[in-house]
Structures are given as C-alpha cells and as structure tokens.
Amino acid sequence: GSGSIVIDGDEHALSPGSYIYLPAGTLWTFRNDSDTAVRFHWIRKAYEAVDGLPRPDVIVTNEQDIAPTPMPGTDGKWATTRFVDPTDMRHDMHVTIVTFEPGGVIPFAETHVMEHGLYVLEGKAVYRLNQDWVEVEAGDYMWLRAFCPQACYAGGPGRFRYLLYKDVNRHMALRPGRVETPVSHALRPAAE
C-alpha cells in the first residue's frame, strides 16, 4: 500500500522503498492513503547525543532516488543503498539496503564492532553466522552480536536483499562498578 506522513506541517507521499528518519521530538502523523495494508519497519532507539554536534535533520527519501554503491572487486554483484551519509557524525545509527545479484558473495568472514540486525526483504541466500551456514529467505530476521563472523553466498535464482540496521559513530557505553552474579535457586541442593 501507499501512505503519507506529515512532518512539522509538511506532507510527504510514501511508497514501497521509502525511508524516513525522524529526530526525537519531531511532530508527525501517518496516514494510509490506500485500500490495502501498509507494511513498514519501525526502528526506535534512544538518540546518543554528542557535545558540539546538532541533532540530525529529518530525512524523507526512497531507495529509487539513491544510486547503490557497489562494493569493490564484486563486479557490481554486491551493492549497498545508503540512506544516510556515512560521514555525517550526527547520526548514531544507519539503515541501509544490501543487495546481492545471483552469484554475489561476501567472500571472507567479516566482523563488525557493533551488534546489527538484518531483515531479509527479497530472495534467498546462505549466510554464515559464526561457524554455521544458515539458509535465509524473505521474511527472516537475524540479530548478530558484535564480532560475529559473517559471510554470504546468494546463489539465486533472483537477487537477495536485506535491510541492515547498525549503531554507528558512538562508543559502547561502559559503566564503572562490579559485576554481580545472580544467585540461582536451581543451584540449591535437591534436599532443600
């Protein structure tokens, strides 16, 4: 379906492939303008401000308006559609669409310092998670821990695409203090 969003009084038409970034405190309303259901992914997180950097601006765009960036050495079989400029330090998260044409691969076990989530939009592939290769397809969701080795083979017959969420441009919050181990009732002797 299609819909529209009004942001601070300005109306924007939405269609499949739309992306919206709303900074905290933005006034908005959403309306379904069609007779069919509108499906979308809503990602919410507390914004991590940085002293000296203003909050990011509202973004309303569509994947059709953004040229995918091919990954080097892949003959265009692996590309990323970036909704946010990766050099914009105001953003503490990115959402991108990763596309593999049939035969496209992540040819090495890559890792990332942050946790990240992948929602499969289209197609089928075999995805490496740690030491396991798992077949995934449209509708599947994966949450990868930090430093989880990953790779991908998209054998076809069609293209394989996923929505990728990851935290960026911020260090993980660490708190001083001691680690407490919870006492488990399961560790009590059976006689108790």
Image (tube, rainbow, N blue to C red):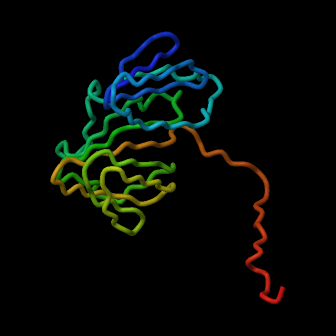
Q: In the rendered image, is residue 62 in sight? A: no
Q: What is the quadrant of the C terminus in the image?
A: bottom right
Q: State the residue in front, 75 or 125.
A: 125
Q: State the residue in front, 42 or 95.
A: 42
- Percent across and percent down for residue 20 are 43, 26
- Percent across and percent down for residue 64 are 26, 27
**Relative horizontal placement of residue 103, taking residue 13 as reference (left or right):** left
Q: In the rendered image, is residue 92 in sight? A: yes
**Relative horizontal placement of residue 192, taking residue 10 as reference (left or right):** right
Residue furthest out toward the top: 9
Residue furthest out toward the bottom: 191
- Percent across and percent down for residue 67 are 26, 29
Give the residue at x 53% y 19%: 28
Residue furthest out toward the right: 192
- Percent across and percent down for residue 133 are 33, 66
Give the residue at x 59% y 42%: 171
Q: What is the quadrant of the N terminus in the image?
A: top left
Residue 131 falls in which quadrant of the image?
bottom left
| Total residue callouts | 0
Q: State the residue in front, 191 or 102.
A: 191
Give the residue at x 57% y 23%: 55
Give the residue at x 18% y 54%: 156
